[in-house]
Amino acid sequence: MKKIIKLLPILLLVFAFSCGDDDFSENFTTDDPTTGWVEFATPNAGTTISAATETLSLPVSLRVPVYKDGLNVSYTIQAVEGDYTSILTTDDTLTFTPDPSGANGNTRVKSIDLHFENVADLTDLVVFDVVLTAVDVNGVTIGVDDESITTYRVSTPCPIVIADSYNVDVSALGGAAPSHTVDFTLVGPNQYSLASTWGPNFVGWATGDDSFNGQYPYPGFIIVNDDLTVDLISDDPLSPDGGTGTYDSCNDVFIISLTQGVFTTDFTVDLVMTAAE
């Protein structure tokens, strides 16, 4: 199933119809209903896609009461960082079909579709802008004031580059447990084996009995998914559920919450894994 990001909920799209008359009277002194402007109908001016994104749809609002012959909005892609050409395909024109009488069912919001491939294979960050550049009808402008969004920035996630080892801060039971360092051993695509998750001395700390140090280290496997969520699969029969979390690929940090079955008391253990230098 294709993964498609829709940046604006359907209900928000109706603003192009409901707010039109006031906006037109405020921003244009002329009574000519064929004048107006276009802008991105997004709540903000940028987003970061995931490695699994295949299509990103950017809604564009046409703020013109009457466009009897239709019109075309031109846009361009401008590189900010890295090479977007290997991952992106799109058109360069958005067409609004003729509407001679005012809206009459014709939508005033259409989407620029950006199609992605091979984002997960990137080894460098890619950032680019989608810029509205021109309208082929006199009297229709790109934007109307400083509030209009006419440039939309798209970023890819930072590439996944897993370090050989991580320093692990551990917290549980309302306190900080002993920290430790653990090696990440590659066992499959974005899958790594860990000899200990919560650390070799966690059970000794939690029980207050140092004789447990070195026991029940809670080994497991970390899987980094395309959307940078993380699954931790337990290799400990006493804690079969493992845990879940996220991976910050730009800062090389894992944040994971573990369940456990070693203790009869039900509690979770939080891990912050930061790449060791």
Image: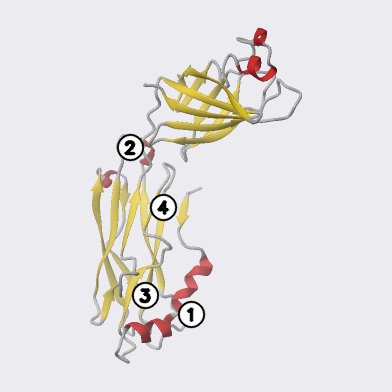
Measured as percent of width and height from the top left, residue 119 is found at 36, 41
Q: Secondary structure at mark 2?
A: loop
Quadrant in the rendering for residue 149: bottom left
Callout 1 touching callout 2 (CB < 8 Å): no
Mark 2 surroundings: few (<14), some (14-19) or many (≥20) residues within 10 A: some
CA separation, marks 2 and 4?
Answer: 17 Å
Which secondary structure, mark 4? strand
The amino acid type found where label 3 is placed reads: Leu
Q: Are marks 4 and 1 in contact (CB under 8 Å)?
A: no
Q: Amino acid at mark 1?
A: Ser
> Could you say which is closer to the camera, residue 149 or residue 121?
149
Looking at the image, is mark 4 or mark 3 nearer the viewer? Answer: 3
Task: Please tell me whether mark 4 or mark 1 is closer to you in this view.
Answer: 1
Determine the CA span between mark 3 and mark 2: 35 Å
Closer to the chain start, of discs 4 and 1, is 1
| Cα distance between the residues tagged 1 and 2 | 42 Å
Residue identifier under label 1: 18
Q: Position of residue 51 (x, y in %)?
A: 41, 41
Q: Which residue is mark 3?
A: 62
In this rendering, is residue 154 above or below 273?
A: below
Give whichever of discs 4 and 3 has the lower sequence position: 4
Q: CA distance from mark 3 to mark 1?
A: 13 Å
Give amino acid for label 4. Answer: Thr
- State the mark number for residue 55: 4
Q: Which mark is residue 122?
A: 2
